[in-house]
Image (spheres, rainbow, N blue to C red):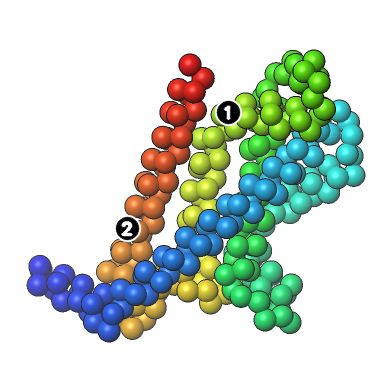
């Protein structure tokens, strides 16, 4: 049995340097995840501010309606369908890099969830904090930036960490637009060796390690933020 495992390892990873399919795919996965996280945070926070501002002041009604429609559509449709629509429909006539398409698709999908997470964090901050900001001479934007959002971030950090872990795993469907990410790299090895166990197990193990590392980093950040409150 040990000899069979050694032979399988050699055929799947060593022969013809097939391990490079995994390393190249891992690089693409990390790039897509990193930039999608940035897109999700930026747009998600903007949407959250629009919605929470409407909830608290009654202003920005039109933008709030558009934000609600956006969140409903994005959360109500599968991410793989959104990915294919963006690539095969919206950018069908343009020669755009598949990595950019994946970043946009996953970033937009994540922004809808981040928006609701951030909005819940903003709404959880006591209304008296806005009054405190005004007493310091801050306008609404300054109060949101310097007082509300830092407090909200502490409340929502676990939820945000979970969302980014989900986003990392969601990128595994990038192969639907022929983007050679980590999962696609494992599938290419499988198609060459006709051995599904070894390459797919390796892909699953790499994802697991990435999730554990990211979870550890989030926990460290949580502890650091708690210590800063003392």
Q: Is 192 placed above or below 1 here? A: below
Where in the figure is residue 162, as x and y percent of width and height? 50, 42
Q: SS for tag 1? A: helix
Q: CA distance from mark 1 to mark 2?
A: 31 Å
The correct choice, above or below, for 24 with respect to 125 in the image is: below
Residue 207 lies left or right of residue 117; in this view the side is: left
Q: Determine crowd level at label 1: few under 14, some 14-19, many 20+ residues with C-alpha closer than 10 A.
A: some
Q: Residue furthest front?
A: 137
Viewer-nearest residue: 188 or 48: 48
Q: Quadrant of residue 206?
A: bottom left
Q: Going 59% across and 66% down the picture, which residue do you hit? A: 102
The numbered dot on residue 155 is: 1
Left or right: 85 in relation to 50: left
- Asked whether residue 183 appears in the rendered view, the answer is no
**What's the residue at 49%, 23% (across, down)?**
228
The residue singled out by tag 2 in the image is 205
Q: Residue at x 51, y 20 (%)?
A: 229
């Amino acid at each position: 049995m040990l000899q069979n495992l050694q032979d399988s390892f050699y055929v799947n990873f060593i022969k013809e340097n097939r391990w490079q399919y995994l390393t190249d795919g891992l690089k693409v996965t990390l790039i897509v995840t990193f930039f999608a996280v940035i897109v999700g945070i930026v747009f998600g926070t903007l949407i959250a501010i629009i919605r929470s501002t409407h909830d608290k002041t009654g202003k920005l009604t039109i933008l709030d309606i558009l934000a609600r429609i956006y969140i409903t559509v994005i959360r109500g449709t599968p991410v793989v369908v959104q990915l294919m629509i963006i690539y095969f429909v919206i950018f069908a006539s343009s020669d755009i890099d598949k990595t950019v398409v994946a970043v946009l698709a996953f970033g937009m999908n994540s922004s809808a969830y981040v928006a609701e997470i951030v909005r819940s964090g903003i709404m959880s901050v006591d209304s008296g904090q806005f009054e405190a900001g005004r007493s310091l001479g801050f306008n609404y934007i300054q109060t949101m930036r310097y007082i509300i959002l830092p407090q909200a971030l502490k409340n929502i950090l676990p939820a945000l960490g979970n969302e980014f872990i989900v986003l990392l795993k969601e990128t595994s469907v990038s192969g639907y637009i022929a983007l050679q990410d980590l999962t696609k790299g494992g599938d290419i090895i499988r198609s060459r060796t006709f051995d599904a166990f070894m390459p797919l197990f390796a892909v699953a193990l790499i994802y697991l390690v990435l999730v554990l590392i990211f979870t550890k980093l989030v926990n460290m950040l949580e502890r650091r933020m708690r210590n800063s409150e003392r």
